[in-house]
């Protein structure tokens, strides 16, 4: 599982903020470190670390980085190619959407948090996904995220009416076999620790055909 920090974040903070190793000890959890990158909503000078926002941005610096990471992991570890996943928060969530748009065939499922990616929408293939959003998010507005979620449901041919999948989470079955979970919590621009358990539960159930 790849876990991408938000703009201005670090791999260390991402590691400390999550409990994926405890919840899924048999998995390999990778916390990459982004490089200084201009932000969309903050830091236009690019003084803080982050991830490219669209295909071709910065000569695909971070997509190429991902490709090299995966190549190295396949060399150094025994990787099950049917169980590769990505999650990320904010700018890292946007990069997760970009990976979905450009590297969908590599992954089994995705779980972006507090993110949208309008330019990626037209490139998305049906894939199991979970979107995490805060009802009080002051940066990536909830109405933007709801539009993104509706588009995901459409791409994946999901039922608009879902079923409970734990606290804050709703499971939307898919006619194409690509379910979507919408995790809507009452907080702000955060990736709540409570979501980790739902992400792991969802990912464990998904295997790439």
Image (tube, rainbow, N blue to C red):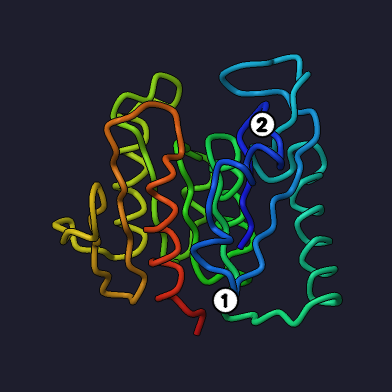
Foreground residue among 202 and 180: 202
Q: Secondary structure at mark 2?
A: loop
Look at 64% across and 41% down and name the residue there.
54
Where is residue 59 shown, x and y percent of the image? 82, 42
Residue 155 lies, with reference to residue 73, above or below; the image says above
Picture quadrant of residue 173:
bottom left
Residue position for label 2: 9
Label 2 neighbour load within 10 Å: few <14, some 14-19, many 20+: some
Residue position for label 1: 83
How far is disc 1 from disc 2 in space, using C-alphas? 26 Å
Label 1 neighbour load within 10 Å: few <14, some 14-19, many 20+: some
Look at 55% across and 57% down and name the residue there.
100
Report the label total: 2
| Residue 207 shown left or right of residue 13 in the figure | left
Foreground residue among 131 and 127: 131
Picture quadrant of residue 53:
top right
User: Which sits earlier in the primary sequence, circle 1 or circle 2?
Assistant: 2
- Foreground disc of the pair 1, 2: 2
Foreground residue among 23 and 119: 23
Q: What is the quadrant of the N terminus in the image?
A: bottom right
Where is residue 52 shown, x and y percent of the image? 70, 38
| Residue 46 shown left or right of residue 81 in the figure | right
Picture quadrant of residue 200:
bottom left
Q: Secondary structure at mark 1?
A: loop
Look at 51% across and 79% down and name the residue there.
208
| Residue 134 shown left or right of residue 110 in the figure | left
Where is residue 114 shown, x and y percent of the image? 45, 36
Where is residue 3 shown, x and y percent of the image? 61, 51
| Residue 131 shown left or right of residue 160 in the figure | right
Residue 139 lies, with reference to residue 72, above or below; the image says above
């Amino acid at each position: 599982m790849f876990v991408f920090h938000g703009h201005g974040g670090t791999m260390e903070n991402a590691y400390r903020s999550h409990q994926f190793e405890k919840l899924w000890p048999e998995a390999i959890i990778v916390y990459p470190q982004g490089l200084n990158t201009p932000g969309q909503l903050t830091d236009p000078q690019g003084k803080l670390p982050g991830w490219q926002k669209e295909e071709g941005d910065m000569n695909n610096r971070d997509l190429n980085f991902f490709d090299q990471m995966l190549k190295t992991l396949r060399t150094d570890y025994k990787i099950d190619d049917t169980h590769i996943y990505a999650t990320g928060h904010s700018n890292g969530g946007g990069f997760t959407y970009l990976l979905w748009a450009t590297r969908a065939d590599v992954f089994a499922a995705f779980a972006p948090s507090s993110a949208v990616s309008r330019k990626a929408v037209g490139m998305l293939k049906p894939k199991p996904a979970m979107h995490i959003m805060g009802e009080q998010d002051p940066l990536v507005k909830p109405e933007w995220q709801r539009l993104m979620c509706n588009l995901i449901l459409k791409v994946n041919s999901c039922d608009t009416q879902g079923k409970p999948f734990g606290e804050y989470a709703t499971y939307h079955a898919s006619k194409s076999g690509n379910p979507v979970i919408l995790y809507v919590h009452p907080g702000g621009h955060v990736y709540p620790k409570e979501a980790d358990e739902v992400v792991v539960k969802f990912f464990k159930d998904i295997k790439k055909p």
